[in-house]
Structure formats: C-alpha cells, structure tokens
Image (cartoon, helix red, strand yellow):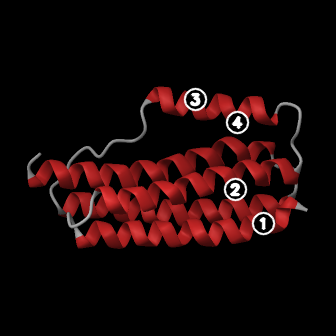
C-alpha cells in the first residue's frame, strides 16, 4: 500500500470505531428508562461525536475524501443485537453491561489499531489516543450502573 492508502486505512479504522460507539448509544438510548443513566449515555455520545468531527476535519486536511462509516451489515448486526438483548431485560444493570462490553471492545480496537498502524501518522495517533482515553473514562463512568 502507498502512503495515502495507509493513511486512509488508519483514519477509517478510528472513524469506524467512533461511529460504532455513536450508533450503539443511539440504538440503546430509547431502551433506557432512568433519566440519570440517559444523561450519562448522552454525555458519552457527545464525546464520541466530538472525536468523530475532529477525525472528519483531519481527513479533510489530509486530502482524504469519503471516509467510510460502517457498512450496512455491521449496522444491522449491531441494531439487531441490541434489540434482541434488551427485549426481555431493560434494567440499568443489563444495559450498563452491554455498554461496558461494547466500550471495552472499542478500547481493544484502539490498542490493536495503534499497533497495526504504527508510524503512519502522529495526528491520527493523537486522535486514537483521545478515543482510547474516552473509552477508559467511559468504562469507569459505566461501572456504577452495574449495581
């Protein structure tokens, strides 16, 4: 792969990670009945939106057009997974568990992307580090909802 393709691959990986988090929260928010928990998830979603917008601006500044969201199959899989999992249990505890699992998967993806794209772009590395830190913070913020 040439440098532009590597850069595009890396920025897409980080972008898709943020988009997965945003979609997960969008899909799960209507299931949440507790106002405090809703506010927490909305706050987390705002953090992901902020990073997503920064990635879009970085892509534009690097001349990368058409960064890609997750494909329709991934979106449908995520949506149906959330629907099935919350069909019988909409408790804060269960939803927090789902969010924790997804957030930890997002964190793991950050770690893997860091190694897979080592030395490609310091700017994208910074975005990835920001996302990784957000994921860690969100893990801590979700834990109290397991009780």
Q: Earlier in the sequence, mark 2 or mark 4?
A: 4
Q: Which residue is mark 4?
A: 82
Q: Which one is in front in this view, the residue at disc 3 or the one at disc 2? A: 2
Toward the viewer: 6 or 86? 6
User: Mark 3 and 2 residues: CB-CB less than 8 Å, in contact?
Assistant: no
Residue sitting at 27 percent across and 58 percent down?
A: 117
Give neighbour class at mark 2: few <14, some 14-19, many 20+ (Cα, 10 Å).
many
**Residue behind mark 3:** 77
Say the numbered circle drawn on residue 143: 1
In the picture, measured across the screen, residue 22 lies left or right of residue 11, that is right
90 or 136: which is nearer to us? 136
State which tag comes first along the sequence, 3 or 2.
3
Give the mark, 3 or 1, whose residue is nearer the N terminus. Answer: 3
Instruction: Look at the picture and state if 127 lies above or below 22.
Output: below
Quarter the C terminus occupies = bottom right
**Quadrant location of residue 34?**
bottom right
Within 10 Å of the Cα at label 4, are there few (<14), some (14-19), or many (20+) other Cα atoms? some
Q: Is residue 50 left or right of residue 85?
A: left
Find numbered disc 2 in the image and state the secondary structure of the residue it sits on.
helix
Residue 21 spot, x, y in % from top left: 56, 51
Mark 3–mark 2 distance (CA, rounded to whole Å)? 18 Å
- The residue positioned 73% from the left and 31% from the top of the image is 83
Q: Position of residue 38 (x, y in %)?
A: 77, 58
Q: Earlier in the sequence, mark 3 or mark 4?
A: 3
- Disc on res. 100: 2
Whether the residues at callouts 2 and 4 have beta carbons within 8 Å, the answer is: no
Check disc 1 and report its element: helix, strand or loop: helix
Evaluate if marks 1 and 2 touch, with contact meaning CB atoms under 8 Å apart: yes
Q: Using the numbered discs, state the Cα–Cα distance from disc 3 to disc 4 in whole angstroms.
A: 9 Å
């Amino acid at each position: 792969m040439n440098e532009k393709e590597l850069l595009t691959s890396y920025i897409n990986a980080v972008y898709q990670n943020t988009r997965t988090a945003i979609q997960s929260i969008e899909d799960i928010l209507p299931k949440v009945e507790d106002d405090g928990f809703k506010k927490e998830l909305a706050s987390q979603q705002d953090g992901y939106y902020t990073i997503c917008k920064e990635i879009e601006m970085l892509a534009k500044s690097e001349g990368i057009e058409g960064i890609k969201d997750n494909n329709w199959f991934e979106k449908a899989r995520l949506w149906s997974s959330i629907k099935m999992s919350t069909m019988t249990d909409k408790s804060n505890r269960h939803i927090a568990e789902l969010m924790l699992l997804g957030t930890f998967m997002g964190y793991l993806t950050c770690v893997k992307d860091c190694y897979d794209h080592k030395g490609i772009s310091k700017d994208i590395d910074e975005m990835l580090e920001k996302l990784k830190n957000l994921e860690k913070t969100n893990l801590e913020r979700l834990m109290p909802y397991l009780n």
